Amino acid sequence: MIQEWLGKVVDREDLTRHDKWLCMMMPRLKLLREFLTDDGVIFVSVDDNEMHRARVLMDEVFEEQNFVGEIIWRNVTDNNPTQISTEHEYLLCYALRKESQPQAWKADGLPVKERLIKLGEEFIKKYPKQRALQEAYTSWFSENKAVLWPFDRYKYIDAGGIYTGSQSVHNPGKEGYRYDVIHPRTKKPCQQPLMGYRFPPETMDELLKGDRILFGEDETKIIELKLYVKDYKSKLSSVYELDTRVGANELRNIFAGEKVPIRYPKPSEYIQEFLSFVAGPDALVLDAFAGSGATAQAVMALNQADGGTRKFVLIESQDYADGLTAERVRRIIKGVPKAKDAALQKGLGGSFSYVEVGHPMQLETMLKAEKLPSFDDLAGYIFYTATGEDFDAVRVNHKTGFIGESAQYDVYLLYEPNLEYLKNTALTLDIAKSLSKGSGKTRLVFAPTKYLDSIHLDQYRIEFCQLPFEIYKAAKRNP
């Protein structure tokens, strides 16, 4: 049934559109579940059209107790007249086994964080005097605040970098320490927090010596602790804000002046955000609907940020898999000279392989046909299943039975698609002697049977493999 739906447009007038979506997703999710490690997680991006169905489906495949959370991605501002403006999408997260997850997810490296650290270093170098430094940064911060979440309160800068004020000096819930902290300008004691200070006087002295305390204009403002961008360890919030146009601009930056077939690609920054919490330095990340290839860029950017060796696998079935998905990866590896981002100009480095999936090689499918599989079809199936390597039909020699060379073997097949041949053919001493010299590797020979002992097999470097028994069953059905 699913095969009948492939390649057909599903629109809002199709009353079975939700059924088709579920039928498409169910087997894929079950397969993806098999790929997860014990501490693995899966993220599923979905909008309002299928959100509640997706949740029920995920509960069934991954089990309700493995639900980790739901992220609301506010990615657009909709000013069109309507009852309720839709300005978000969803990201569902499930674990294979939730009990295998750490109690709290923390991330050191975030895209915005890395940019702000670098920006701070540039400003400090350019403006050695504190007043000029703060004025320059204040001007920049005012222009860019809207895109700095979750750092949109980090409006200060000093020789230590960009920072914000945190009320973590306040004692929460119960009476804390009471002592005076003198304001450096007015020389008067600063107003104390309602429940006193969280730290004892000795700790406060250390913070003051290290210039980690932020004072107000005068003593009437309660002091705050300086929280630098470089020290920030974030939590993965259930609400994330990033304009979806960032993804489109990112793609235009890579494919300047070229037309791309995806209008609203996901920003790599968005993917990098949640990967930074769950993909450790040696993680393997699989994107089953790769689209524009943003996941690859996110993985490589994380590796560049922390020196990790993460790997990615992208799967894309649309006709732009090579021209867009893979081409984006090629360009961000080598570098995009005209890109606005300095890292993209230089290139993120690394390597990848691009392969296309061939026709299914399933013996059961071959043997259900009216005729037995052809020599080439069976050769392709046998070569791949025996070696795990790509089959090159050009190298096949029907006369000698040679079907290819792998890293370990020269592979041969004694076969013709008829029952009489299968009944009367065997690997004999004469055939062993007649096999081509090949590369000198062990010869892996597939045949109906053999009339050779182990001594002669060793002498001629042969490992014998009998043809699958199912072939004989099919031959009897299709004489």
Image (cartoon, helix red, strand yellow):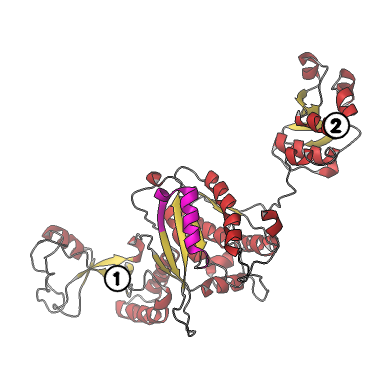
Image-quadrant location for residue 172: bottom left
**In terms of image quadrants, where is residue 222?**
bottom left
Q: Quadrant of the C terminus?
A: top right
The amino acid marked with disc number 1 is: Thr
Q: Is residue 387 left or right of residue 379?
A: left
Q: Quadrant of the N terminus?
A: bottom right
Q: Is residue 379 magenta?
A: no
Q: Residue at x 49, y 43 (%)?
A: 37
- State the image quarter where residue 344 is shown: bottom right
Q: Alpha-carbon neighbours of circle 2 within 10 Å: few (<14), some, or many (≥20)?
A: many
Nearer to us in this view, 449 or 83: 83
Front position in the image: 60 or 395: 60
Q: Which residue is mark 1?
A: 164
- Of all residues shown, which one is farthest toward the front? 15
Q: Which residues are magenta?
A: 49-69
Residue occupying the point 55% across, 59% down: 295
Considering every residue shown, the one lying at the far bottom of the view is 81
Image mark for residue 415: 2
Ranked by sequence position, the earlier of labels 1 and 2 is 1
Q: Position of residue 461 (x, y in %)?
A: 78, 23
- The 10 Å Cα crowd at callout 1, few under 14, some 14 to 19, many 20 or more, is some
Q: Nearer the viewer, mark 1 or mark 2?
A: 2
Query: Is there a contact, CB below 8 Å, between mark 1 and mark 2?
Result: no
Was residue 54 drawn as part of the magenta stretch in this picture?
yes
Q: Report helix, strand or loop for mark 2.
A: loop
Where residue 41 appears, as percent x and y from the top left, is 46, 50
Taking 295 as reference, is 322 left or right? Answer: right
Q: Residue at the right extreme?
A: 399
- Residue 152: image x %, image y %? 36, 73
**Is there any visible trace of residue 324 in the rendered image?**
yes
